[in-house]
Amino acid sequence: MLSPILKRKILNHFKKWCWQPFTYTGPAYNLSYYLALWSGWIRERIDPTDKIKELKNYSLNVNKRKQNILKNLKINSADRKLFQIAADIIYLKAYRKDGVFFGMYVLDKLLREIGSRLNLSIKQTRMIAYWEMPAAIRRSYFSADILNARREFSVYYQKGRKGAIYTGAKARKFLAGLNIEKEIIKKVSTISGTVACPGKARGLVKIVNLPEEMGKMNKGDIMVAHTTFPSLVPAMKKAAAIVTDDGGITCHAAIVSRELKTPCIVGTKIATQILKDGDKVEVDAGKGTIKKIK
């Protein structure tokens, strides 16, 4: 039986941080996630005091290593400022993403309330454009048929200050009129990208683009994704190497891989199209290459 004090601390922690994996449409962590996590640590007899100390020391040690590198390489003050600017950019990029995800989590609550007043589901409510929302709330009504049509097939186009939404045949006609060049993917023996964290690894490919696909990941697999975000971190922790289509050295995959010390190549553009689940590959995150092997 939990004491009232401990129960309150658990609930406060849950309410403060449950939004972290939300991205743009959720879901957030539920209370059972934290309870399962904490009960696992208790069974493993992990001392929280030691864990907190370890995290604090990690940050201090990284800073010490950074200062030693700058000293040993005799980096001048002007270049040190550039390195610090780069470090600030990486921090702010992650902070910005946290801000966006928290904002989407709060917005979701607002949309659910609006949906309940309009007798609409959250998926329908998300299809209402911002300029349509005031009138819908005043009238306590918005056509569910229109929203369902938008969910089925629609295009949002903006030129100037106000956007336009096309659905069905009109949306298809609009798209047909655009000159969109399709990239032709040729057969390649080697995929290349930008090195985000050096190292080498061999393993089986697992394509993981969504949280519900994380169950296929086993320890030592090569995680391949279009891009990564916070709710995919549990899969990233299992990976022997991480490969993404998008991103640069300051993207989410790059930052997390460096924290995990996991070899990582980003910005390949075509990895998820060339590779498939079960392919055996060799990742050389020194050269920035991924090769299929037998």
Image (spheres, rainbow, N blue to C red):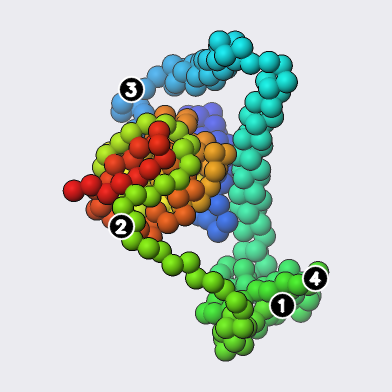
Q: Which residue is mark 4?
A: 160
Q: Does residue 27 sit above or below 161 in this rendering?
A: above
Work out whether mark 2 precedes mark 1 in sequence or the reverse, and give the earlier one. Answer: 1
Counting from the top left corner in percent of width and height, residue 235 is at: 38, 44
- Taking the spot 40% from the left edge, 36% from the top edge, the residue there is 287
Q: Quadrant of the N terminus?
A: top left
Q: Nearer the viewer, mark 1 or mark 3?
A: 1
Kindly report the distance in space between the C-alpha atoms of the residues bearing marks 4 and 3.
59 Å
Residue 172: quadrant of the picture: bottom right
Q: Which residue is mark 2?
A: 276
Amino acid type, callout 2: Lys
Kindly report the distance in space between the C-alpha atoms of the residues bearing marks 1 and 4.
10 Å
Amino acid type, callout 1: Ala
Mark 3 residue crowding within 10 angstroms, few (<14) / some (14–19) / many (20+): few
- Taking the spot 54% from the left edge, 39% from the top edge, the residue there is 249
Q: Which residue is mark 1?
A: 164
Q: Nearer the viewer, mark 2 or mark 1?
A: 2
Mark 1 residue crowding within 10 angstroms, few (<14) / some (14–19) / many (20+): few
Amino acid type, callout 4: Gly
What secondary structure is found at the residue carrying circle 4? loop
Instruction: Depth check: give the residue in front, 15 or 159.
Output: 159
Q: Residue furthest left?
A: 294
Work out whether mark 1 precedes mark 3 in sequence or the reverse, and give the earlier one. Answer: 3
- Taking the spot 61% from the left edge, 78% from the top edge, the residue there is 178
What secondary structure is found at the residue carrying circle 2? loop
